[in-house]
Image: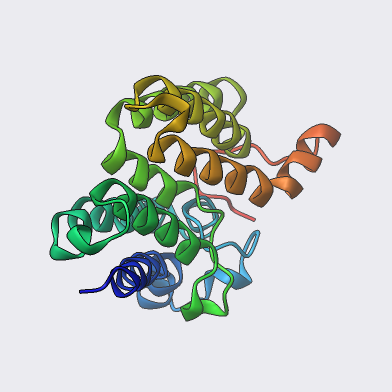
Amino acid sequence: MSAPLALTACVAIGYLCGSLPWGLWLGRAFKGVDVRTLGSGNLGATNVYRSLGRGIGVATLLLDIAKGALPVWIVPHTGLAAAFPGGASWCAIAVGFAAVAGHVWTFLAGFKGGKGVATTVGVLLALSPPAFGVFMAVFLLTLLVTRYVSLGSILGSLAFTAALARFSAGGVRSPAFLLGALLAALVVVRHRDNIGRLVRGEERRFSFARSKS
């Protein structure tokens, strides 16, 4: 297989996996509703949890994580990695970024998906368990103290970028750090409206109970 074909195949597999809109599908299957018409209109697990309840919200979260982790675990161990420019490491980077892009801009839901956090977490889990652990620690601590999911996601993304610089072979020159920096920037950009609400004191706090609104 040629290098351009391997690159195309890796990006396509990652994007297709990331594009699976589990929040949309589960909402339709179990509640008969389109979650895009509820709450924030986002397909991510937070809006699904708030709008459709704990069970569907947690299932969406786990499936959105899996669609980032599984292709990054599997594809670099196939024949595609041998033909990929730069080898298995860069193959994993391409698949991971494409998976998150698929989640954010899924062609199966009008190119409007989630904010990329859960799928990014899945990519981290596959690429760097220590960076994944740092993200989870910062995210959960921020959530427990402030009950702002958005703030936890933003601070966690900045933290995992720093962790990748520390734990990845090659530090800030490693492929993993490059991917982490790109994904962290994407998470921050996707939360720009939340940042505005945080500054104005208007951001909605997370509750573990389903919203009655």
Quadrant of the rendered image containing residue 154:
top right
x and y, in percent, of residue 22 in the image:
38, 67
Residue 2 screen position, x and y as percent: 26, 73
Q: How many marks?
A: 0
Q: Nearer the viewer, residue 73 or 62?
A: 73
Q: Quadrant of the N terminus?
A: bottom left
Above or below — where is 151 with respect to 12? above
Q: Residue at x 39, y 42 (%)?
A: 121
When asked about the image quadrant of residue 11, the answer is bottom left
Decide: is 22 above or below 91: below
Please state the horizontal and vertical placement of residue 58, each as a whole percent of the image: 36, 50
Identity of the residue drawn at 46% across and 53% down: 45
The C terminus - image quarter: bottom right
Colour mapping: rainbow
Asked whether residue 208 is in view, the answer is no
Q: Is residue 99 visible?
A: yes
Q: Residue at the location (61% across, 34% down)?
A: 148
Q: Residue furthest right?
A: 200
